C-alpha cells in the first residue's frame, strides 16, 4: 500500500501530537516495511528524521503552494495525493483535507479527544468554532475514524452523531525511551541538575483547571507537615496557575511544591526543553499523580508505567482504560481521597512494588508493535 500522512505535527510539535505522529510513523515503517509511507509536510525540521527508513518519503508543496502551505495542507494536498497514486491518507491530528472524500483516496482520521466540546470555557470562542468545524468535518467524511480511547469514541458519537461502526478505538503508544532503565549515575546526575528531592510526587501536564492541580495542593495541605511529600510540577499555565499559586502562598506550601518549569536550573538544561531528561525525572519520582477530570488518553500514565513509577490517577474518563489494574484510583473531586492515596502509595513499599510490576504488564498492551498492528488492521479493512 501507498499510505500518506499529515506530517505537520511530526515535524513541528515536540509534545503530544508530535510524539504520537512520530511514534506511529516509525512503528509502521519498521513493522510493515512492504508499504510505502509519504509524509505530507509544508516544511521539514530536525524533530523527525526519515533517513533511517528507505520506505518513508517526505513530500512538500510545489509551485504556488510553496507560498501557500496552509492552503495546500487543508485542501489542495489532494492533488498531490492523486499524483502519487496514494491508497490511504491518514490525518494524524483530528482533521483531513477538504474534498478528499470526492477522490479515490481512502481516508482515516485520528481523533485524540473532544476536550473543547466538554470544556468550551477553557478555549477561545474562535478556536472552538475552528476545532468544531474541522473535527466534525473529518468525522463525517473520513472512511474510518480512529479514537484514542473508548471515552473519545463515545464523545464522537454523542457530539457528532457519528455511527459507532465507523469508529475504531486505537490506543496510542509512547516514546520508547521511557522503557529504558537508566543507570544510577544518570539518575543521580539528573537529580542533582534539577535539585530534585529524594522523594517526590510528579505532576506533568498543562496547569489548567481540568488537570486539577489545585486539589492536589489541597490534599497536601490537609496532611500533617511531617507526612507531606514534595510535589514537582512540570507544566505551564496562566489564570489557573495563578489561582494555584495564590492558594499555595495562603497555606504556606511554598516549600512543598516545586514548579520545575519556572526554575532557572531547568530552563538551562537542554534535556528539559527536548524532554530527553523526562524519563529520568519519572524514574526518580515516588509516584505520578494525575487527578485529571477528563482526558482523551492520558499519555503521562503510560509514560509512568513504562518508567516503573506508580500512578495515582482519577477513576473517571479514560484513565482506567490506560491504567488498567496497575494504578491507584481516586475521586478527583474528593480531597481526602487524594490525600489518602498519597499517604498509602508514599509509605507502603509493598503496594508500590505491586503497582510497578502491574504497570509493566499494562504498558505492554500499548507497545509500538501492538498499536501499529491495530492501525494496520484498519488500513487493510478499507
Image (spheres, rainbow, N blue to C red):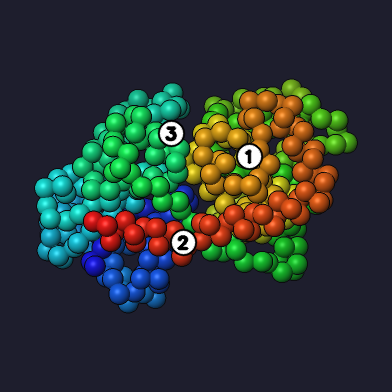
Residue found 39% across the figure and 29% down from its top:
117
Please tell me whether residue 169 is drawn above or below residue 216 in the rendered image.
Answer: below
**Closest to the observer: 212 or 70?**
212
Note whether residue 350 is visible. Answer: yes
Residue 278 x %, y %? 61, 56
Secondary structure under the numbered disc 1 in the rendered image? strand
The residue tagged 1 is 313
**Closest to the observer: 40 or 359?**
359
Residue 288 x %, y %? 67, 46
Residue found 49% across the figure and 44% down from its top:
297
Secondary structure under the numbered disc 3 in the rendered image? helix
Residue 366 x %, y %? 51, 56
In the rendered structure, the answer to whether residue 223 lies left or right of residue 268 reads right
Separation of disc 1 and disc 3 at Cα? 18 Å
Residue 34 x %, y %? 30, 75
Label number found at residue 370: 2
Separation of disc 2 and disc 1 at Cα? 24 Å
Residue found 52% across the figure and 35% down from its top:
317
Residue found 18% across the figure and 63% down from its top:
86
The residue tagged 3 is 115
Amino acid at each position: 500500500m501507498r499510505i500518506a500522512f499529515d506530517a505537520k505535527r511530526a515535524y513541528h510539535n515536540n509534545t503530544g501530537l508530535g510524539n504520537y505522529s512520530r511514534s506511529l510513523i516509525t512503528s509502521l515503517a519498521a513493522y510493515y516495511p512492504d508499504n510505502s509511507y509519504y509524509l505530507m509536510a509544508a516544511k521539514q525540521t530536525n524533530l523527525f528524521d526519515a533517513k533511517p527508513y528507505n520506505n518513508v518519503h517526505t513530500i512538500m508543496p510545489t509551485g504556488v503552494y510553496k507560498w501557500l502551505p496552509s492552503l495546500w495542507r487543508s485542501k489542495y494536498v489532494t492533488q498531490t495525493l492523486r499524483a502519487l497514486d496514494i491508497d490511504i491518507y491518514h490525518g494524524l491530528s483530528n482533521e483531513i483535507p477538504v474534498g478528499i472524500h470526492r477522490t479515490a483516496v481512502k481516508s482515516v482520521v485520528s481523533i485524540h479527544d473532544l476536550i473543547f466540546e466538554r470544556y468550551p470555557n477553557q478555549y477561545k470562542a474562535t478556536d472552538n468554532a475552528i476545532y468544531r468545524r474541522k473535527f466534525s468535518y473529518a468525522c463525517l467524511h473520513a472512511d474510518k475514524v480512529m479514537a484514542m480511547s473508548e471515552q473519545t469514541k463515545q464523545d464522537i458519537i454523542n457530539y457528532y452523531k457519528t455511527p459507532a461502526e465507523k469508529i475504531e478505538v486505537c490506543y496510542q503508544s509512547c516514546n520508547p525511551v521511557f522503557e529504558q532503565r537508566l543507570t544510577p549515575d544518570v539518575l543521580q546526575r539528573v537529580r542533582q541538575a534539577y535539585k530534585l528531592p529524594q522523594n517526590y510526587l510528579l505532576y506533568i501536564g498543562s496547569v489548567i483547571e481540568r488537570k486539577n492541580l489545585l486539589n492536589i495542593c489541597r490534599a497536601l495541605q490537609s496532611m500533617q507537615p511531617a507526612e507531606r511529600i514534595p510535589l514537582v510540577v512540570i507544566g505551564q499555565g496562566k489564570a489557573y496557575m495563578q489561582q494555584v499559586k495564590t492558594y499555595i502562598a495562603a497555606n504556606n506550601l511554598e516549600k512543598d511544591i516545586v514548579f520545575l518549569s519556572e526554575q532557572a536550573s531547568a530552563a538551562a538544561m537542554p534535556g528539559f526543553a527536548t524532554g530527553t531528561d523526562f524519563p529520568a525525572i519519572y524514574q526518580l519520582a515516588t509516584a505520578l499523580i494525575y487527578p485529571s477530570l477528563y482526558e482523551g488518553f492520558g499519555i503521562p500514565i503510560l509514560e509512568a508505567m513504562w518508567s516503573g513509577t506508580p500512578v495515582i490517577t482519577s477513576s473517571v474518563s479514560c484513565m482506567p482504560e490506560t491504567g488498567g489494574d496497575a494504578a491507584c484510583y481516586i475521586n478527583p473531586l474528593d480531597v481526602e481521597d487524594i490525600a489518602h492515596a498519597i499517604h498509602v502509595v508514599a509509605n507502603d513499599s509493598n503496594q508500590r512494588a505491586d503497582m510497578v510490576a502491574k504497570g509493566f504488564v499494562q504498558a505492554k498492551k500499548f507497545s509500538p508493535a501492538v498499536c501499529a498492528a491495530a492501525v494496520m488492521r484498519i488500513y487493510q479493512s478499507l
